[in-house]
Image: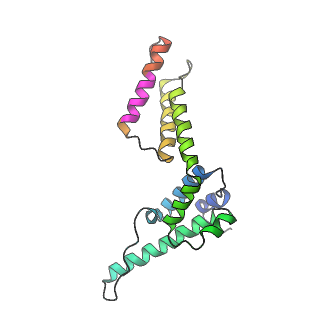
Amino acid sequence: MASFSPLVTILYQNKLTESNYVDWKRNLDIVLTAKEHKYVLTKPCPSFPSLDAPLEEKQRYDHWQKSNEMVKCYILASISNVLQHQMQDVKLASDIMLSLKEMFGEQGRSARQETMRQIYNTKMAESSSVREHCLTMISNLNTLEVLGADIDGESQVDMIFQLLLNHSRNSNSIIT
């Protein structure tokens, strides 16, 4: 294990179990992004090059294949033995991720709903600053994004302002 990078250690120490899919996926995304392999989960494999294809086309295909194999290794090494056995013969890392999402993705929906509930129920404490409150809200919005929610920046700002406005109306105080 001494040869593992600190990023890969994150996956080793946080293997996918039935209850931690959202956290596991976030950690996997971090590792794959840092290792520059995440693209194989969203970009299709280039067509198999013909014998007379340009070298660049052959290299692109080979690079994608090697990245796919690395992503599969990262995924398989970071899931339970039972899941490894189920997924070991799947050719594409994106297909493994799709299967895992189908098995555990409902956790993401529940987590998104809970985070939305937290956002709308967050009250600014009398002793806290607007800055602290906004940072809390931004953190919750970032969590939503990690969980797959797609809320554009303008809507996020609108949500924060609306919640601040509601707070000022309810507390009859001036926000500074």
Quadrant location, the N terminus: bottom right
State the residue in front, 104 or 61.
104
Residue 103, by quadrant, is: bottom right
Give the percent coordinates (x, y) of residue 111: 56, 42
Query: Which residue occupies the extreme bottom position in the image?
Result: 51
Q: How many numbered marks appear?
A: 0
114 w.r.t. 46: above or below: above
Q: Is residue 36 left or right of residue 19?
A: left
Give the percent coordinates (x, y) of residue 126: 55, 17
Residue 73, by quadrant, is: bottom right
Residue 114 belongs to the span the image colors magenta: no
Image point (41%, 71%), residue name: 45
Image point (58%, 66%), residue name: 74
Residue span colored magenta: 155-164
State the residue in front, 92 or 74.
92
Give the percent coordinates (x, y) of residue 104: 59, 53
29 w.r.t. 154: above or below: below
Image point (39%, 32%), residue name: 157
Quadrant location, the C terminus: top left
State the residue in front, 81 or 86.
86
Colouring: rainbow
Query: Which residue occupies the extreme top position in the image?
Result: 172
Give the percent coordinates (x, y) of residue 59: 38, 79
98 w.r.t. 129: above or below: below
- Residue 176 in sight here: no
Image point (47%, 65%), residue name: 37
